[in-house]
Image (tube, helix red, strand yellow):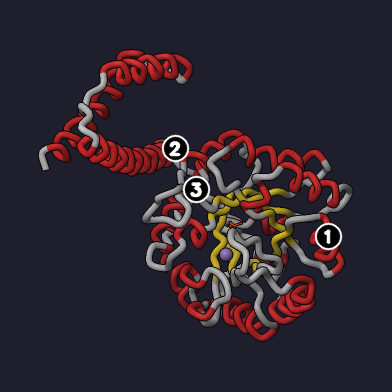
Amino acid sequence: MTTESSTTMSPAQLMMQKKPLLIAGPCSVETEEQVIATAQRLAATGKVDVIRGGIWKPRTRPNSFEGVGTKGLPWMQKVKEMTGLPVTVEVAKAKHVEVCLEFGIDILWIGARTTVNPFAVQEIADALRGVDIPIMVKNPINPDLSLWMGGIERLQKVGLKDIAGIHRGFSNFGEKIYRNRPQWQLPIELKRRMPEIPLICDPSHICGRRDILAKVSQKSMDLNFDGLMIESHITPDDAWSDAKQQITPEVYGQMISDLKMRDYDTSALPAKSDLEVLRKQINFIDDELINMLANRMKVARDIGSFKKENNVTILQNTRWNEILEKYKKRGAGSQLSEEFIVKFITAIHDESISQQENIMSE
Ligand code: PEP
Ligand code: MN
């Protein structure tokens, strides 16, 4: 944790050094009054370092609110003047970069729907060549670590020095709990491969709902993330975008106060702490494994229903042999012994069969 007061730090120093870096603000900038009131109430909590606001909104479906556009930039400037806090805005193309620089936006971020597209990221990088501004890169919507790293590398190649990553979860068809599944092993791997990149968690887009925001925020702090980005709105239910996941500034302030911040600066702590961090990581990965197994069994039961309706046997030996052979080969490339792979896949397969047998006898 830094001891320096955040007010004396430049936006770049803040983003690269303050821990935890706390970013909050509305999903979308809607009106001048809304963004200013949100920012002032957030600033009053004393628990925010940077105010966020979406000006151009990349929407999955058309006919949703697509953002106020450039006219929102002077409002962000006002937010900065009135609160003394730096502001951050999402950019998706060169034109956005150009006007953000014109209006003195302090930190930029690239959204998940842009990180998936190397053409778009390159266009942004080209617009930033020779510019010194901090920038954050959200993970792509699909769980592809190379694409995420590629986005960061494109920005590094044009000379940007202050780059952070934001973990906002991954889109997954049929997911029930999260809007975007966290799949913590991906950001953990990003941190291992790019330790110099601060990693911020965006629980709002992971959860898509308010009731589990605190839990996911705490999880990210336990995993030694460097900061949080949380969406906050003065009247969340009336928000023009992402209404279900936004919280009032006061609820935000309370949530941040309730977080247990553990100091994982292992240089100052006995070696035992290393072990603690690793064990936490193992616990979270195991949790993910169980979730994935539960999803797999649901698919197996659906296959069971199909087989029942179509009078097909549960076990099809050729298919089972193919699966086993395929994973034995995969195992060899991932430092897993053949014996373990066979045991593991067989156990999963046995459980699938017994679940399908239950369906058959229903
Ligand atoms: C956002 O931060 O409002 C946003 C659009 O997020 P994402 O790119 O993670 O979907
Ligand atoms: Mn949003």
* Residue 353 x/y as whole percent: 20, 30
Report the image quarter containing ligand 1. bottom right
Q: Label 3 to label 1, Cα distance in Å?
A: 35 Å
Q: Is residue 123 above or below residue 102?
A: above
Residue wearing tag 1: 95
- Taking the spot 66% from the left edge, 74% from the top edge, the residue there is 29
SS category of the residue bearing label 3: loop
Query: Number of labelled discs?
Result: 3
In the picture shown, does residue 65 fall above or below 234? above
The nearer-to-camera label among 1 and 2 is 1
Secondary structure found at label 1: helix
The numbered disc on residue 225 is none
Q: Quadrant of residue 308?
A: top left
Q: For the N terminus, which image quadrant?
A: bottom right
**Residue 163 seen in render:** yes
Q: Circle 3: is it few (<14), some (14-19), or many (20+) Cα within 10 Å?
A: many
Distance from disc 3 to disc 2, alpha carbons, whole Å, reads 11 Å
The type of residue carrying mark 1 is Lys
- Image: 303 above or below 47: above
The image position of residue 85, as x and y in percent, is 69, 72
- Between 360 and 209, which is closer to the camera in this rendering? 360
Residue located at (52% from left, 82% from top): 235
Q: Disc 3 designates what residue?
A: 224
Left or right: 243 in relation to 100: left
Q: Compare marks 3 and 2 and give the one earlier in the sequence.
A: 3
- Looking at the picture, does residue 285 appear above or below residue 199? above
Q: Quadrant of residue 53?
A: bottom right
The residue that mark 2 highlights is 274
Q: Quadrant of the C terminus?
A: top left
**Disc 2 marks which amino acid?**
Asp
Identify the amino acid type marked 3: Asn
